[in-house]
């Protein structure tokens, strides 16, 4: 069953590339006592994710911070090296977006957001969504009906919903 507004995020370990190489990030620790904008994409470097979704959050960073958001996180079912390269290629890293890999899709499956699109070569990927999370609880959840659209999950839509 998919996560919904009012639910607590499950404990999950995501990955990023740190100064010493790949490192685990406990999502529960990251969200504890904080207001977070979390958005997920089907895949790094895929067309809508690359040209629409990440840029929408880059454009919305100031507005999100003005509404009290402590950190903006992008999650994708990719490896941490791909997420690092994608952060650099899009400018997300410089914009302050934290790019985290759900390398085994464990978090994506735990919140009921996994999907498969074999014709596009996407297996066990994340549906496109954006959520506002406060102290680990989902306050707003904007999920797209189609992985190829980025409207209600865009950064501007999350700001407007706040």
Image (cartoon, rainbow, N blue to C red):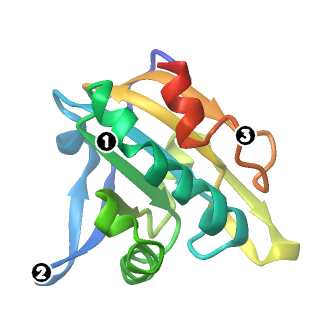
User: Which quadrant does the N terminus fall into?
Assistant: top right
Query: Considering depth in this image, is 138 or 84 the residue closer to the camera?
Result: 84
- Crowding near the residue tagged with mark 2, few <14, some 14–19, many ≥20 C-alpha atoms within 10 Å: few
Q: Is residue 141 above or below residue 102?
A: above
Which residue carries the number 2 mark?
19
Residue 107 point in image, percent of width and height: 45, 50
Which residue carries the number 1 mark?
11
Which residue carries the number 3 mark?
144
Q: Is residue 64 above or below residue 53?
A: above
- Asked if residue 7 can be seen in this view, the reply is yes
Residue 138 point in image, percent of width and height: 43, 24
Asked if the residue at tag 1 contacts the one at tag 3, i.e. Cβ–Cβ closer than 8 Å, the answer is no
Q: Residue furthest right?
A: 119
Image-based side of 57 in relation to 18, left or right: right
Asked if the residue at tag 3 contacts the one at tag 2, i.e. Cβ–Cβ closer than 8 Å, the answer is no
Q: Is residue 144 above or below residue 159?
A: below
Q: Nearer the viewer, mark 3 or mark 1?
A: 3
């Amino acid at each position: 069953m998919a996560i919904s507004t009012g639910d607590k995020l499950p404990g999950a370990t995501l990955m990023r590339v740190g100064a010493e190489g790949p490192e685990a990030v406990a999502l529960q620790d990251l969200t504890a006592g904080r207001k977070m904008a979390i958005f997920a994409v089907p895949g790094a470097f895929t067309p809508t994710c690359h040209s629409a979704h990440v840029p929408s959050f880059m454009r919305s960073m100031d507005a999100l911070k003005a509404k009290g958001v402590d950190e903006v996180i992008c999650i994708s079912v990719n490896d941490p090296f791909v997420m690092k390269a994608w952060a650099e290629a899009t400018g997300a890293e410089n914009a302050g977006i934290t790019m985290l890999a759900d390398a085994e899709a464990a978090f994506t499956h735990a919140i009921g957001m996994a999907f498969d699109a074999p014709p596009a070569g996407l297996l066990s990927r994340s549906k496109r969504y954006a959520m506002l999370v406060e102290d680990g609880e989902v306050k707003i959840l904007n999920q797209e009906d189609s992985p190829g659209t980025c409207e209600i999950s865009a950064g501007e839509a999350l700001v407007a919903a706040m």
